[in-house]
Amino acid sequence: MVEPIKMQSREEREIAIEAAGFNTFLLRSEDVYIDLLTDSGTNAMSDRQWAGMLLGDEAYAGSRNFYRLEKTIQNFYGYKHVIPTHQGRGAEHIISRALIRQGHFIPGNMYFTTTRLHQELAGGQFVDVIIDEAHDPTSEHPFKGNVSLQKLEQLINKVGAENIPYVSLAGTVNMAGGQPISMACVKAVRELCKPKGIRVYLDATRMVENSFFIQEREEDFSDKSIEEILKEFCSYTDGAWMSAKKDSLVNIGGWLAINDHDVFELARNMVVIYEGLHTYGGLAGRDLEALAIGIEESVLQEHVRSRVDQVRYLGNLLETWGIPIVRPVGGHAVYLNAKSFFPHIPQSEFPAQTLAAELYIDSGVRSMERGVASAGRDEKTGEHKYPALELTRLTIPRRVYTQAHMDVVAEAVKSVWDKRDSIRGLKIVYEPKYLRFFQARFKRISSS
Ligand code: P70
């Protein structure tokens, strides 16, 4: 799909960002020139996917498209049972409610906002067991998404295996900068957990891109296909939830896949309360069809390589100009290190939020904060949680932008970089209780 984009004046953008409370989530899409807010649901569908949309079987129950999707997920991801959901968080909700009880602990390779919230709402507490290198934007570790087995083992010894319903693993860890987890690591997690009866569940949202990094960086995988690597990785886990809006190249959709029949039955029962019947899960038949086709296209070598290389192209350009980004460049986005970008803005004044707002004002490029605003507040003290990483994410939709767009984006970032010393931070003036970054409003801190 091709869409006309509009370039506005700086004055118009100043007005738009003020009206949006300096929050890029509150901008109108019409006011954006190049939209790098997210790679979620913003991918361009192929001719085959659009053709598939016309083959929607919109029966309430037992749609043909569901059976095709079920088979495709079984083929490519290898899980036994499949439940469609409207998107990723619908699946997170169900798996969390099905397995987590009050007082449970859920270890994982760094939090993700919606995942952690659903785990907490179900009565659990998320515990970060990612390796230390993940919190260091300059570390060149090839698998910064890896779990620290030592941290995981310590937690198990401390709280007891019976209080850990599952380990929550994610492919290309979003909040760490799109960093992959290795095959050796998932195997080791499996070996540690299996004898203790702890399940391993996977956030498969960007597991295809993770598989590409395994192929590129891990010994013994360079001659394996993305498809083979994906399936092997999933085989060390008991199930997965998925936001299909990313890897799978659709505008909407998700799923939950589970090997254990009892857990599957429970989840399949819950889906009818919250999403829809278990053969559509809040999606239309045509959406299920586009998703099944998207999965097949998503694992193609040339597609994944050109996608990840485009992200790296942008990252490399910024690096040649000395602009601080998270190293190595991740799978779906370039993450600007806002702490180094604006050393004069304390974290309490939202450097990453400031950078996202300034980039928009300067050039109309929309990005997303991934720092203190995203981390939220500590339940007990009410204080901001201050994450080590304070990042502004330039997220690249799949099959949408060209290399020329990347050049424009890089120059836009450079332009803010060149005047960074004159930029002041923000204060928060409104915040909702849940996932505040989506709807919070900010004001500029005045110079006096
Ligand atoms: C993004 C989107 C969604 C997402 C994810 C991972 C690793 C689950 C989900 C939820 C959208 C988003 C969500 C929260 C905050 C900001 C942006 N990520 N797991 O842009 O899936 O959105 O389909 O419910 O990245 O990174 P869904």
Image: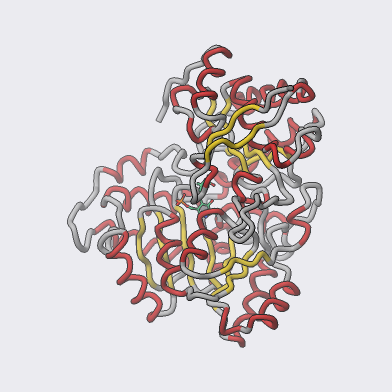
**Which image quarter: residue 18?**
top right
Quadrant location, the C terminus = top right
What residue lies at 68% left-to-right and 33% top-to-bottom?
A: 314
Q: Position of residue 286 (x, y in %)?
A: 28, 48
Q: Position of residue 79 (x, y in %)?
A: 45, 70
Of residues 322 and 342, the one nearer the viewer is 342
Of residues 309 and 323, the one nearer the viewer is 323
Q: Position of residue 76 (x, y in %)?
A: 46, 62
Determine if residue 236 is in view.
no
- With 439 as the anchor, is 156 left or right in this view? right
- With 416 as the anchor, is 51 left or right in this view? left
Q: Is residue 291 above or below residue 105?
A: above
Q: Is residue 329 above or below residue 63?
A: above
What residue lies at 61% left-to-right and 54% top-to-bottom?
A: 382
Determine if residue 42 is in view.
yes
Quadrant location, the N terminus = top left
Q: Is residue 116 above or below residue 356?
A: below
Of residues 36 and 234, the one nearer the viewer is 36
Of residues 198 and 376, the one nearer the viewer is 376
- With 5 as the anchor, is 391 left or right in this view? right
Q: Position of residue 235 (x, y in %)?
A: 54, 72
What residue lies at 57% left-to-right and 45% top-to-bottom?
A: 302
